[in-house]
């Protein structure tokens, strides 16, 4: 645990600076933390959704290297290699029966973004849009059940996949 905390501190310090290799090129570090909320769906028990009617929440971490080409100001192109770890927890209670689930996923993301720099004097911002390849490394799920009959027990499998998402 101590090594993880030290790594986060070092990466945070490094994320505050980027190394410019030339005026139009930049290498950098990306560090991100998030908290996700997957709202309660409108599905009913018996639907194919796992734990129908359950909302999930969790935290995530992203760490990686980025490369940006800024040759067409205010447009730039960015790519990189980013490792992401995400978790989500949810629970379902029906009478004296309770089911809790925790999901974890580890992926490597390769963003291919077009970015537009907004300059409002002392305030600057960036809008980015583009595809992002996701390579599934591992995923896991743990389901804990209390007072749930074996016939009603949840069946859950996870499979690593490679996919492409559009992000912005």
Image (cartoon, helix red, strand yellow):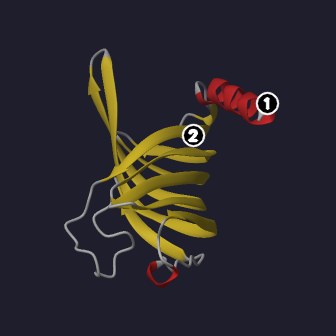
Residue under pointer 2: 30
Tell me whether circle 1 and circle 2 mark residues in contact (CB < 8 Å).
no
Percent position of residue 18, x then y: 61, 31
Q: Residue at x 52, y 39 (%)?
A: 32
Which of the 4 image quarters holds residue 29?
top right
Q: Residues within 10 Å of mark 2 (few under 14, many from 20)?
A: some
How far apart are the alpha carbons under marks 1 and 2?
21 Å
User: Is residue 8 shown left or right of residue 88?
Assistant: right
Q: Residue at x 58, y 52 (%)?
A: 84
Q: Residues within 10 Å of mark 1 (few under 14, many from 20)?
A: few
Percent position of residue 79, x then y: 53, 54
Q: Secondary structure at mark 1?
A: helix
- 134 to 38, vertically: above or below: below
Residue under pointer 1: 2
Which quadrant, please, contains the N terminus? top right
Q: Secondary structure at mark 2?
A: strand
Percent position of residue 65, x then y: 64, 46
Q: Residue at x 34, y 75 (%)?
A: 49
Q: Is residue 51 visible?
A: yes
- 62 to 1, vertically: above or below: below
């Amino acid at each position: 645990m101590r090594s993880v905390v030290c790594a986060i501190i070092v990466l945070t310090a490094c994320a505050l600076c980027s190394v410019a290799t030339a005026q139009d090129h930049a290498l950098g570090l990306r560090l991100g933390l998030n908290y996700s909320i997957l709202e309660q769906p409108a599905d009913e028990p018996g639907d194919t959704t796992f734990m129908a009617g359950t909302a999930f929440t969790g935290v995530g971490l992203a760490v990686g290297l980025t490369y940006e080409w800024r040759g067409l100001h205010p447009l730039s192109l960015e790519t990189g290699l980013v490792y992401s770890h995400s978790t989500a927890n949810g629970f379902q209670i029906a009478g004296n029966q309770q089911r809790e689930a925790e999901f974890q996923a580890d992926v490597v993301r390769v963003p291919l973004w077009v970015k537009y720099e907004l300059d409002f004097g002392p305030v600057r911002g960036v809008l980015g849009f583009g595809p992002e390849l996701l390579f599934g490394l591992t995923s896991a799920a743990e389901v804990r059940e209390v007072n749930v009959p074996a016939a009603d027990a949840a069946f859950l499998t996870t499979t690593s996949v490679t996919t492409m998402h559009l992000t912005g």
